[in-house]
Amino acid sequence: MAGHEDEVRHAYGDNMGWRLTGYAKRLSGPPVSVREISRTEFLTIRPFFDAEDNPWLVDLNEVVPAIRPCVEHVLGPLNPDEDYYITGHPLDWDKDPVHVARDLLDTRYPLARAAFLGGSVAAGTYTANSDLDMVVIVNDLPGAFRETLRHRGWPVELFCHTVESFQDFVARDTEGRRPPLLHMCAEGFLMLDADGTGQRMRTEARALLEAGPPLATVTELEDRRYGTTDLLEDLIGTRDEDERLFVAARLLTCAGELALVVRNRWLGHGKWLVRRLRDAGEHEIVDSYREMVRGDGSERFVAAVETVLESAGGRLDAGYRRTAQSR
């Protein structure tokens, strides 16, 4: 049940209104009862129903005797002579990112097999500056592509794939420890699943993320240790404050990635790197870096980097050698 509640919270923003509509059983025609219900009422009953194919509609004909008291406790008595539906409608279309994403999907890819909405919108943490991160799976596509566009005033990052190209990109990204497509499919909102492809992709993505990245090779660890050691020496040795800031910024990334590799955790760029570090409990390197850039000295940051290096086998400089690849 908790999983359904998480998806509901991500999918339904505060911009939605909800309506309970009743139709006479065995008779066609207009509704015989209509009333507005609250978002809280909808979210309370939504986990009882399977509405994956259309998350803005709940068919209360699925109410079985076991859950009927629970539903009526929230919505009040239901007339046994009526078929009930709950439908959602946007209070302000262009301000609701989920509706904008669905409109883009309906406009540009009405025959898509599956689509996911990821990023901050799916996480429920979006702001006025957020974009819509969408993965769309289609059959007839000459080649996978990424496109940045605007739709109804929202910036959109669109990733279009066939099932096969998606799998190829995921394999390559997994090897590099940064699989954004996996995260969007595993953690995002499944907007469209025309033939079961979306649910299969979601299940596979979650399994791959849970399994974690490939174990680091000795060569990779040595390369990362060497790069981190080199930057650490530069930081300790510099007397130029501007150089110190630039070296420290690069060192934060290298040491942070090394810490995650040692723990066999997924990597990320920019804000996603700091989120991965927080998830892994690697707070000291971030806190000490913040302290340094605020002018409180670099001693704590240097010590934090040294700790990361020790977890990977210690500093590496003298004796490090790589043979150039033939061209």
Image: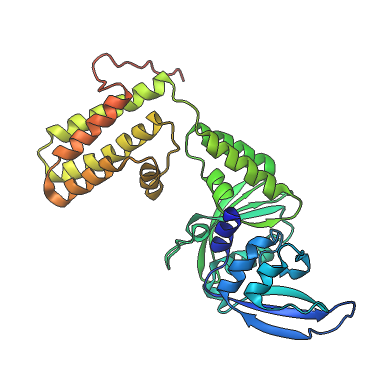
Which quarter of the figure is the N terminus placed in? bottom right
In the rendered view, does 214 fall on the left or right side of 299?
right
Q: Nearer the viewer, residue 275 or 224?
A: 275
All told, the count of numbered labels is 0
Residue furthest to the left: 239
Q: Quadrant of residue 27?
A: bottom right
In the rendered view, does 47 fall on the left or right side of 31?
left
Query: Is residue 69 in view from this perspective?
Result: yes
x and y percent of residue 33 in the render? 75, 85
x and y percent of residue 126 in the render? 45, 63
Q: Identify which residue is drawn at 59% across, 38% down.
A: 207
Q: Nearer the viewer, residue 312 or 40?
A: 40
Q: Is residue 272 above or below residue 26?
A: above
Q: Identify which residue is drawn at 12% across, 43% down.
A: 297
Q: Nearer the viewer, residue 90 or 246?
A: 90
Query: Is residue 134 in view from this perspective?
Result: no
Residue furthest to the top: 319
Q: Is residue 59 above or below residue 288?
A: below
x and y percent of residue 86 in the render? 69, 73
Q: How is the image coloured?
A: rainbow
x and y percent of residue 208 in the render? 57, 37
